[in-house]
Every structure is written in structure tokens, then in C-alpha cells.
């Protein structure tokens, strides 16, 4: 079967990266474009099974809705699938359904948002099938069933309409042997178009592990990937990095693991392999700061690590214990790790959250104080958002907001009990001003004019979101 996989265009007023936040997606800087890794994995497993696959990344090719439809009008497909995000769900799914209708073929959607709102998706859109959670085994079984006319009831992990109702087939178990999954089909992507502001030249993303045992109550990664940490072997990851560098000529890599250094020995082995192969790559990762130490930082830097992002979330120990679970050993220890990384030439980025349900204004400002004290190279202040299916979302019950268009990670959606959405938005802007308008920080930013310009644009967007 010939299958079209679509990464839809972002809305006109913001760029959305659908793979972030565990697949719920997030509004990002307009200078950042990640490849659609979920679609590239889906294409790889479908092609391995013998299907003919095409990926159309409208985001990377700067196509609007009309241009996307026109691009695929003349080609015949047997099925059309699309990636999705929370904030863009309506436009994503209507586009995929329109393309499928144009060809008279079935449509399907993937992504964390559709996985946990499948009833709403199948009731309110023209999408025929929702593929829940991990996509690789499910998409192959679905396309095989469609091609051979088998009963869809046999396909685990699929939801669909039948006889006026909605059927949810049994959930599929998480993939245990990640090494068995073929590498993403990067030959179907426009690799030269993917970029990130602080890396020069094309970049790609690599997922070396899935799952996160930290279990923050608002986190989408544990929903889509599970609490169990599952990792690829160091040799398997190294083989993909060799392909990325030697076959595709890509030097810049961003690891898309929620907890990259959970297994320190695996990362040490990977770093040793990168050095041994003389790969000449630069890479970034995301992890918990408590999963780092000085020796590991040194090995990572030797192997080409240039940036580490880590979640601190909140300075308040009670809020951290209740919602975050990613608590740092101590503020002093965290500052020492950040200073060590900086001394090695590794850029650091801290994630901080404002607006937990019972959080007060003094608690929010203490988190900003801690951000200033830790002094990472950059900081991201986001609004606490209860993505559908998360423990926080369930705890809120009928109070959980459902205007998904605002679930961009930055816009307050009414979670906090003490501040209005306008007041919380003002606090987030205040946090950015406090962090970036320090004299030392301004001097640092002037050395990176492109990065400074992108942050100014981001701040303007925050101003306009009220």
C-alpha cells in the first residue's frame, strides 16, 4: 500500500513542534524546526514491511494548508496519516481528513493528544482511526489489515468508529527491544531544512531511550512512553549516529530522550564510542540534573556535547514533592553541576514552571530567585499545563480546561487558584525580564545577536498572548 504521512503546517501566528512535551507539542521559537521523528519511525517500519511510504513535512517546507493539499492532489495513496499536537489538533486532523477524502481512502492520526482524547477526535473530525501511544507496531498492523481487508478489531492500540459508536481496541504493550526498531527514514525528509538557533547548519533528532520513572504529574512523556525506562544499547545508538554523520552529512544532533543520562554507564559507553569513531558531531540532550556528575559531564563534553537542558521546575520543596518529583539534591549542588558544565564549555538550559494549582505569588518569585542563583546560560519559564490523561488532569476532574488551542506550554490555562490567567502571564514575562535583563546577561546576549533576536521575538509573542 502507498501511505502518505503528513506533518501539517503550523498556525500562522506561531510555530508548533509536535514532538515536544511527550507528543502533546509545544509552541517554539520560529527559528527551530525539528524533524517529525514519529513519522520517520512509522515510515521506517512500514517500508520494512514492504509498503511504499511518503513523508510530507509541510512545516519544514513552509507550505500552508492549500499548498499542502495541492502538493499531494495528483498522487494516489491507499491511506493518509498525520502527526498532531494539542494546540493544533483541529487544523491537523481536518487537513488529514480532507486529503484522505480527496483520494477516497482511510485516514489515521498519531500523537499523545489524540491518544487521550480519541472519543472527541473520532466524534468531531473526519479521522477514521486513532493510533494510541507508541506508533511503530500499531501502524504496521493497521496498514496490513487495511491492505488485506482484515478485521480492524484484531489491531491492538487502535480506536475507530463502528455501528454508530466508538471502539477502543485493547492497548498495545510498550516495545521492549528498542534496538529492533529500524532507524528513522531520514531519506524521506528534507534534512537540510531542520535547524535549531544555537547550532550552525542542519540538525537532526535521535531518540536513544523512552520512558521516565520520575513521574511528574503534568508530564506527557510518561503517558506516551511509560514510567519504565527503556533504552537502546550504546552500540545501536552509535550506529545511528554514524549513519547520521557519514550517510547524511549531518553534524548537529539533538537527543529527544526525556531522561538521557538515567543510565550513566550507557552514556559513558556511548561517549567512548563517539570518540573512538572520531565522529565529529555536536549534540544536545535533556536530563534531570540529579542524573549528572562531574566525571560524566567531562566524558560527554569530550564526545561532543555542547548543551544540556534540565528540569528544575520549582524552588518550593512541597510543590516539587507533590507535582514534580524531579527535585534536585540541593540548590548548591545543582549550581555546582551547572558551573562544572559551563567550565567544560557545555551550555546549560534550565526549565522552570509557574502556576501550580495552589502556588502563591511568593512561591513563584522564589522559583525565579533560584533561576537567577543557578544562572544557567538560558532559562525557560512555562505555565503549568494539565495535558489530557496526566495525573494532574485527572485530579482536576471537571475543572480541567478543554480549550486545547491554548495548550502551547506558555499560555496560562486557568490552573492556578491564586492568580488570574492575566496575572500569571504577567509573572511569566516578569521572570524572563528578571533573568535576561541583568547587565551580565545582556552583554552575553549581544555576543549572539541571532539568538538575542529570537528571544526578543519570543517575548513579543508572550506580550501579545494576553
Image: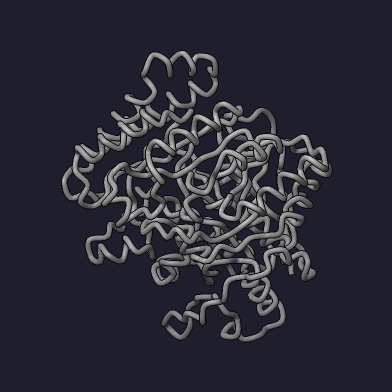
> Where 5 falls versus 291 (above or below)?
below
Q: Residue at x 39, y 57 (%)?
A: 216
Q: Is residue 75 visible?
A: no
Quarter of the image for the C terminus: give it.
Answer: top left
Return the residue nearer the eye: 396 or 212.
212
- Residue ID at (23%, 40%): 363
Q: Position of residue 63 (x, y in %)?
A: 59, 41
Query: In the figure, residue 83 lies in which quadrant?
Result: bottom right
Residue 103 image-quadrant placement: bottom right
Q: Quadrant of the N terminus?
A: bottom right
Residue depicted at x 62% and y 68%: 104
Can you give x and y, in whole percent of width and height, for residue 371 in the image?
Answer: 37, 33
The quadrant in which residue 455 appears is: top left
Q: Is residue 124 above or below residue 162?
A: above
- Judge left or right: residue 282 versus residue 107: right
x, y (%) of residue 33? 58, 39
Camera-nearest residue between 27 and 361? 361
Answer with left or right where residue 394 lies relative to residue 79: left
Residue 10 in sight: yes
Amino acid at each position: 500500500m502507498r501511505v502518505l504521512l503528513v506533518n501539517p503546517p503550523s498556525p500562522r501566528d506561531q510555530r508548533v513542534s509536535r514532538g515536544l512535551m511527550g507528543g502533546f507539542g509545544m509552541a517554539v521559537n520560529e527559528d527551530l524546526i525539528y524533524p517529525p521523528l514519529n513519522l520517520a519511525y512509522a515510515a521506517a517500519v512500514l517500508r520494512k514491511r514492504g509498503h511504499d511510504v511518503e513523508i510530507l513535512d509541510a512545516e519544514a517546507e513552509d507550505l500552508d494548508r492549500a499548498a499542502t493539499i495541492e502538493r499531494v492532489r495528483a498522487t494516489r495513496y491507499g491511506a493518509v496519516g498525520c502527526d498532531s499536537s494539542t494546540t493544533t489538533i483541529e487544523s491537523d486532523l481536518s487537513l488529514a481528513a480532507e486529503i484522505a477524502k480527496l483520494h477516497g481512502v482511510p485516514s489515521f492520526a498519531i500523537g499523545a493528544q489524540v491518544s487521550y482524547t480519541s472519543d472527541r477526535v473520532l466524534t468531531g473530525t473526519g479521522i477514521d482511526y486513532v493510533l494510541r501511544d507508541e506508533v511503530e507496531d500499531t501502524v504496521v498492523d493497521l496498514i496490513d489489515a487495511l491492505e488485506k481487508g482484515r478485521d480492524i478489531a484484531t489491531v491492538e492500540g487502535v480506536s475507530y468508529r463502528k455501528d454508530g459508536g466508538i471502539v477502543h481496541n485493547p492497548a498495545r504493550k510498550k516495545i521492549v527491544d528498542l534496538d529492533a526498531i529500524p532507524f528513522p527514514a531520514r531519506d524521506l525528509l528534507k534534512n537540510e531544512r531542520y535547524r535549531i538557533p544555537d547550532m550552525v547548519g542542519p540538525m537532526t533528532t535521535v531518540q536513544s531511550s523512552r520512558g521516565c520513572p520520575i513521574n511528574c504529574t503534568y508530564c506527557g512523556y510518561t503517558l506516551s512512553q511509560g514510567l519504565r525506562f527503556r533504552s537502546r544499547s550504546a552500540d545501536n545508538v552509535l550506529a545511528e549516529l554514524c549513519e547520521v554523520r557519514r550517510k547524511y552529512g549531518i553534524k548537529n544532533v539533538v537527543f529527544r530522550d526525556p531522561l538521557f543520562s538515567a543510565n550513566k554507564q550507557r552514556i559513558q559507553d556511548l561517549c567512548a564510542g563517539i570518540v573512538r569513531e572520531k565522529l565529529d558531531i555536536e549534540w544536545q540532550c535533556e536530563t534531570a540534573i540529579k542524573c549528572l556528575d562531574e566525571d560524566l559531564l567531562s566524558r560527554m563534553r569530550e564526545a561532543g556535547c555542547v548543551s544540556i537542558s534540565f528540569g528544575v521546575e520549582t524552588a518550593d520543596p512541597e510543590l516539587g514533592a507533590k507535582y514534580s518529583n524531579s527535585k534536585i539534591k540541593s540548590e548548591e549542588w545543582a549550581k555546582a553541576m551547572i558551573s562544572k558544565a559551563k567550565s567544560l564549555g557545555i551550555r546549560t538550559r534550565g526549565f522552570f514552571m509557574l502556576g501550580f494549582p495552589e502556588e502563591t505569588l511568593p512561591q513563584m518569585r522564589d522559583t525565579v530567585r533560584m533561576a537567577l542563583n543557578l544562572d544557567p546560560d538560558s532559562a525557560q519559564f512555562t505555565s503549568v499545563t494539565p495535558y489530557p490523561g496526566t495525573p494532574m488532569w485527572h485530579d482536576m476532574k471537571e475543572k480541567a480546561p478543554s480549550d486545547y488551542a491554548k495548550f502551547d506550554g506558555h499560555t496560562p490555562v486557568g490552573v492556578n487558584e491564586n492568580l488570574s490567567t492575566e496575572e500569571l502571564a504577567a509573572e511569566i514575562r516578569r521572570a524572563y525580564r528578571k533573568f535576561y535583563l541583568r547587565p551580565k546577561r545582556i552583554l552575553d546576549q549581544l555576543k549572539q545577536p541571532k539568538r538575542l533576536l529570537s528571544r526578543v521575538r519570543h517575548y513579543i509573542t508572550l506580550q501579545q498572548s494576553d
